[in-house]
Structures are given as C-alpha cells and as structure tokens.
C-alpha cells in the first residue's frame, strides 16, 4: 500500500521515464517535491521494498520501474483518536492502495491515527488504517467506534456482561468502559495499517519556512510580516490555526480577550481611565464567550504535538471558562500559576479587594505524553526580578513579577501587554531551542520577542494591524541589537 506522497513520487518517476526515457535521479525528485535527500531515500527504499521499483545494474541510474500493480482509490476521511475520544471529523482526501489488499465487494475507507493507545498492536501516531465498514464486531477486533454519537476512537472491542469495554493496546492506558445506556456505534473493523513515514517528520524549521505543501495549505492566509524564525498573520486565529499542520507545534501561549470592556473605570499612571480596550474585548454573553474559548482551544489542541503544552492567561472574567473548556477537550492540566503583580492598579470603588494577580493554566495535549519541563533552569536560574523565588530552591506556583517596564512600551503598548520577564519564564520552562511557538492573540508579540531572543521559532496571529505594526517595530529593534552584538564580538 502506498501513502499519498509515495504515490506522487511513483507517478512523477513514471512521467519522467515516459517523457524522456530516463529514470530521474534522487536530486531531481527532491527538487521537484521540495524534499531533502534523506526523505527521498526513505520513500525510494519503501517503493523498492513494496515492489514498485527495482534495482538494476546501471551504475548511474540504477533503479527501474516494476510492472504496474493494479491500484484502487479509497477515501481518507480524516483522523481517529488512538487515545481519548475526539469529536468525529470527516475531511475527505483520496489515497491509492493495491487492489488485492481490498476485500471484494467491501466498503473500505482510511483514517489517520492520532495518539499512542494502540502502539502494542503496531499502530502508531501518524499511521493510516484501512477500515472495512460494518456495524458489528467480535471480541478482540480492532474497531472504529463512535461514542455518544459524536466522539470517535480506535480501540479493541470487548462485549462484557453488562457493559462494553474499549481496550487500548498500551499497558500504560486505561480502557473506556461504556455502561448505563451510553451510546456506542461500530463504524468499522481495521483491516491493515499503512506506515506513513512522511507524517510527523516536519520539523519546526520546515513548518515555519513554509515548504511547498504548507504554502499550498496556507494559500488563503494573509501573511503580514515574515522574517527568519518570526512570522505574523493578520487574520482571525481560527482561520490560521485550521491551516497549520496537525501535531506540529511545541508550545502555545494565549492571552485571549478577557471580555471585561463594560464601560467601567480603572487607574493607569495615576489617572482615571476607561477599562474599554476595543470591540474585541466586549462580552457576547456567557454562552457565546464560552463557545469562543472552546473553539480556539480545540484548534490549538489539533496543532500541538502529543507532548506539546499550552499556557493560557486570564483574570476571573475568562480563566474559569478556559479551564472548563481545557478539561472538556481532553487536555491534561499540569499547573495553575498565580502571577502576583506588586505594582497593580488600585481599586477605585473601594467595594472589592484590589485585583492584583492573574492566573495562568499550563496544560499538556495528551495525558500520557512526556512534556518538556526544564526543571534545573527553573530551580537554579537567575530570577532576581521575583522576590518570592529563593535561589537554588524549587520554583513555586506563585510568581511575583511587575507589569511591563517602560522600555517594553517605547513604541507603544497593547492594553493587555504581558511583561517580558513573564514570557521568558514560560518559554524557558516548557520549550527547547529550535521549538515552534504559536500565539493566537499575539498583540504586541512579547511572546515572539522572547521566543526569537532565546532561539525559538514563532508564529503570531492578531486581528488588529496596529498591534502587528507595534510587534514589527519591537522585533526589528531586537534583531538589529542582536546583529550588532555579534558583529562587535
């Protein structure tokens, strides 16, 4: 069976041979598809192993096309969770498989696997499974099951006395038990697995630098600014997040709208000012606000790698909705951080406690995955700006950090701009150099500034061009300073 990329390469080779009578060398194939030599070597080895190509005695072009196999096209309907159930998704593509692998008169479709719950059956994250459509299953069969009429999962099926058990093939994971009338519908039984060697090999730099495939995916996106390791989009974050590849992002930091622009007043620089920040920060009612948070968090979960993590910041106006949505979507919450602001604005009404902190939630995409946490950097790093952090001791979950310094606002400011010291801690705690970070509400791009400064890649998204212009000014000053620093060494 061939993956879509392997089929494309085989078809290209056939066209070259038919047109010029000569087999293309690997360098020519790589140039045509925008792939590196090692990836082409993998695909060629697979095509030889599967019998589509064969080695010959010709030294310079030592591979020939084997006699054609009869192929059949089947739909690749989308993704299936080998982990916790996910909302059923159908997004049809077409792949080609040998006809003799498909049972006669059977309705067969393909799904891409997301998760690691079936690894002991040699079904891994990124693989494609061939599924025979049927509505019944025998004990022990690997099935695609629809749970509660909207959540799809891949598990081994067992009908027990009084309940149904959906068993993962991973000793570290618990089964899903369905009883008391919970609805389950068998969608099909697994026939075979396709190893997709191209899946999950996109590195952060390949994704960031927009290979041919990703450029095609993003053809409707509006890139506002792009430099090496730093890219900004002027768009609704849901549009851009939907175009980024699945399982490609190492970390997301999000500071979503707090929805508190209600005509009230606060204090800034000793003056009474309005709390209104813009139309984007106005509440649309509890249900609509919650739906918004659920949608962007769901979009972020799709693009995060299995071990990837997400940070979300907010006040009580928004953080509890985000926390509920995180749990509903299957994230695993790692910590909640209380960011205490020693220089917070006073409360003018004198009817409440003075709001002097924000809450950050740190969550991992997959419960069983192993996330990045740079423990030693947090314990032994220089965190002198935080008077609660004791040198050489574990970093606790209450951080004392001031609001942005004047130098951070020299080109202007975003109304909810975060201090660089806060983002520095998040980035250094939960990513490594070369990782890819996304901020779906980038504002003045403090996340991007810190990511770039510390050797990470960054994608920022915002709907306001004035804040992206501010981001560009901040980035270009940082870039100049870094270049001057290296030039003078």
Image (tube, grey):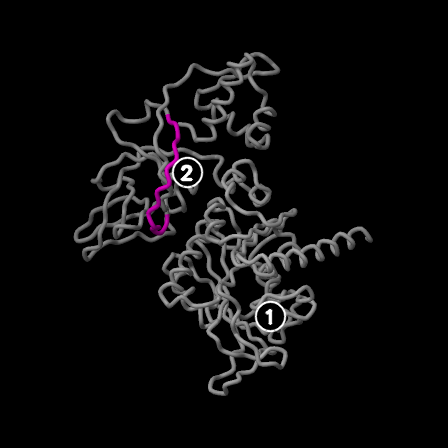
Is residue 478 toward the left or the right of residue 248 in the image? Answer: right
Above or below, 480 relative to 382 = above
* Residue at x 49% of width, y 56% of height: 309
Q: Which residues are magenta?
A: 83-97
Is residue 335 toward the left or the right of residue 377 in the image? Answer: left
Q: Which residue is mark 1?
A: 393
The local secondary structure at tag 2 comes to loop
Above or below, 10 relative to 387 = above
Is residue 247 toward the left or the right of residue 30 in the image? Answer: left
* Residue at the extreme bottom of the image, as rendered: 350
Q: Total number of numbered labels? A: 2
| Residue 368 visible in the snapshot | no
- The image shows residue 246 at horizontal and vertical percentages of 46, 45
Above or below, 149 relative to 50 = below
Crowdedness of circle 2 by 10 Å Cα count: few (<14), some, many (20+)? many
- The image shows residue 397 at horizontal and vertical percentages of 52, 70
The local secondary structure at tag 1 comes to loop
Q: Which residue is mark 2?
A: 127
Q: Nearer the viewer, residue 288 or 49?
A: 288
* Residue at x 54% of width, y 39% of height: 215
- The image shows residue 267 at horizontal and vertical percentages of 57, 80
Disc 1 vs disc 2: which is toward the camera? 2
Above or below, 348 relative to 74 = below
| Numbered mark located on residue 65 in the image | none
- The image shows residue 330 at horizontal and vertical percentages of 38, 56
First of labels 1, 2 by sequence position: 2
* Residue at x 32% of width, y 22% of height: 100
* Residue at the extreme left of the image, as rendered: 161
Q: Distance from label 1 to label 2 (Cα)?
A: 43 Å
Is residue 414 toward the left or the right of residue 290 in the image? Answer: right
Image-quadrant location for residue 467:
bottom right
């Amino acid at each position: 069976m061939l993956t879509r990329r392997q089929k494309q390469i085989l078809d290209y080779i056939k066209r070259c041979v038919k047109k010029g009578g000569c087999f293309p060398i690997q360098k020519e194939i790589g140039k045509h598809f925008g792939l590196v030599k090692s990836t082409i070597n993998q695909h060629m080895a697979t095509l030889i192993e599967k019998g589509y190509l064969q080695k010959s005695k010709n030294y310079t072009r030592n591979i020939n096309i084997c006699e054609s196999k009869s192929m059949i096209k089947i739909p690749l309907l989308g993704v299936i969770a080998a982990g916790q159930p996910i909302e059923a998704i159908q997004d049809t593509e077409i792949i080609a498989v040998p006809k003799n692998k498909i049972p006669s008169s059977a309705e067969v479709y393909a799904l891409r696997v997301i998760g690691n719950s079936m690894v002991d059956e040699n079904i891994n994250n990124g693989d494609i499974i061939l599924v025979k459509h049927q509505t019944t299953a025998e004990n022990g069969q690997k099935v695609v099951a629809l749970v509660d009429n909207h959540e799809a999962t891949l598990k081994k099926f067992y009908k027990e006395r009084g309940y149904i058990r959906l068993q993962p093939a991973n000793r570290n994971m618990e089964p899903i038990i369905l009883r008391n009338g919970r609805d389950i519908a068998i969608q099909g039984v697994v026939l075979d697995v396709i190893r997709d060697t191209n899946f999950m090999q996109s590195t952060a730099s390949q994704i960031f630098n927009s290979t041919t495939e990703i450029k095609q995916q993003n053809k409707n996106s509006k890139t506002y600014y792009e430099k090496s390791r730093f890219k900004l989009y002027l768009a609704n974050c849901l549009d851009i997040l939907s175009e980024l590849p699945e399982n490609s992002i190492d970390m997301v930091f999000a500071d979503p709208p707090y929805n508190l622009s209600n005509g009230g007043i606060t204090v800034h620089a000793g003056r009474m000012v309005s709390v209104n920040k813009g139309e984007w920060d106005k509440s649309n009612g509890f249900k609509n606000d919650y739906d918004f948070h659920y949608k962007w968090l769901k979009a972020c979960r799709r693009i995060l790698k299995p071990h990837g993590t997400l940070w979300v910041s907010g006040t009580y106006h928004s953080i509890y909705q985000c926390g509920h949505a995180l749990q509903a979507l299957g994230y695993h919450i790692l910590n909640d951080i209380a960011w205490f602001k020693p220089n917070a604005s006073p409360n003018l009404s004198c009817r409440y406690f003075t709001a002097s902190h924000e809450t950050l939630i740190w969550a991992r995409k997959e419960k069983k995955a192993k996330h990045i946490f740079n423990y030693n950097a947090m314990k032994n790093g220089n965190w002198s700006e935080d008077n609660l952090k004791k040198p050489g001791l574990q970093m606790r979950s209450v951080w004392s950090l001031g609001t942005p310094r004047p130098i951070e606002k020299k080109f202007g400011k975003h109304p909810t701009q975060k201090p660089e010291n806060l983002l520095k801690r998040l980035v250094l705690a939960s990513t490594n150099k070369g990782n890819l970070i996304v901020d779906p509400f980038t504002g003045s791009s403090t996340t991007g500034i810190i990511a770039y400064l510390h050797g990470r890649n960054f994608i920022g998204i915002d709907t306001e061009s004035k804040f992206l212009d501010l981001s560009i000014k901040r980035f270009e000053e940082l870039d100049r300073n870094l270049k001057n620093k290296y030039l003078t060494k």
